[in-house]
Amino acid sequence: MTINIGDALPQVTFTVMTADGPQPRTTNEIFAGRRVALVGVPGAFTPTCSLNHVPGFVEKEGDLHDKGVALIAVTSVNDVFVMNAWAKSLGADHEGFVFLADGSAVFAKALGLTLDLADRGLGLRSQRYAMLVDDGVVTQLNIEQASGKADVSSAEALLKQL
């Protein structure tokens, strides 16, 4: 079952890179008590994700913060080392962003937002989406119908909903 507006995010443990190395972070630790823009992508360093989707959130970071978004979280079915390198390559390795490694697709599965790209050699991935989460509850949900597009899940689209 796919997550819907009004649903609480599933409780999982992500891995994030910190100054002390990889560390676990729970859904509550990331989303409780604040407004978060959550961006789900099929894969770090893939063309649409790296050239269009996440760079839009980097570009619009200030606008999102001005509208009350405390944190921009990016999740993908990749390991924490790949996610950390990707954050650095995008200039998003600073406070205000967090890259959430969902290496085994536990979060993507729990959301009901998986994408099977096995025929392309990529295995099970996350669908492309952007959502607004207030204190752990989904208040906006924008899921792309085509994984190679980042239109309804763009930073601009989310900003219009704030």
Image (cartoon, rainbow, N blue to C red):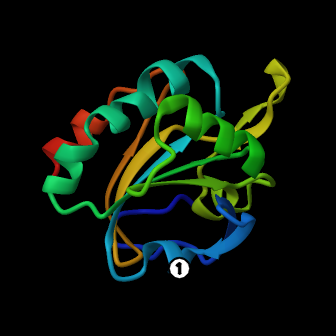
Residue at 22% x, 49% y is: 64
Q: In the displayed structure, does residue 162 sit left or right of residue 127?
A: left
User: Residue 146 location, x and y as percent?
Assistant: 50, 25
Between 115 and 83, the one nearer to me in the picture: 83
Whether residue 127 is visible here, answered yes or no, is yes
Judged from the image, the secondary structure of the residue bearing numbered disc 1 is: helix
The image quarter in which residue 115 lies: top right
Residue at 45% x, 50% y is: 94
Q: In the displayed structure, does residue 83 sit left or right of residue 30?
A: right
The image quarter in which residue 117 lies: top right
Q: Amino acid at mark 1?
A: Glu
User: Residue 132 location, x and y as percent?
Assistant: 32, 58
* Quadrant where the image shows the N terminus: bottom right
Whether residue 147 is visible here, answered yes or no, is no
* Quadrant where the image shows the C terminus: bottom left
User: Compared to 139, does 48 lie above or below?
Assistant: above
User: Residue 160 location, x and y as percent?
Assistant: 14, 42
Residue sticking out furthest to the front: 19
Q: Which residue is mark 1?
A: 29
Q: In the displayed structure, does residue 90 sit left or right of residue 45?
A: left
User: Residue 135 location, x and y as percent?
Assistant: 35, 78
Mark 1: few, some, or many residues within 10 Å (few <14, many ≥20)?
few
Between 116 and 88, the one nearer to me in the picture: 88
Residue at 44% x, 73% y is: 31
The image quarter in which residue 108 lies: bottom right
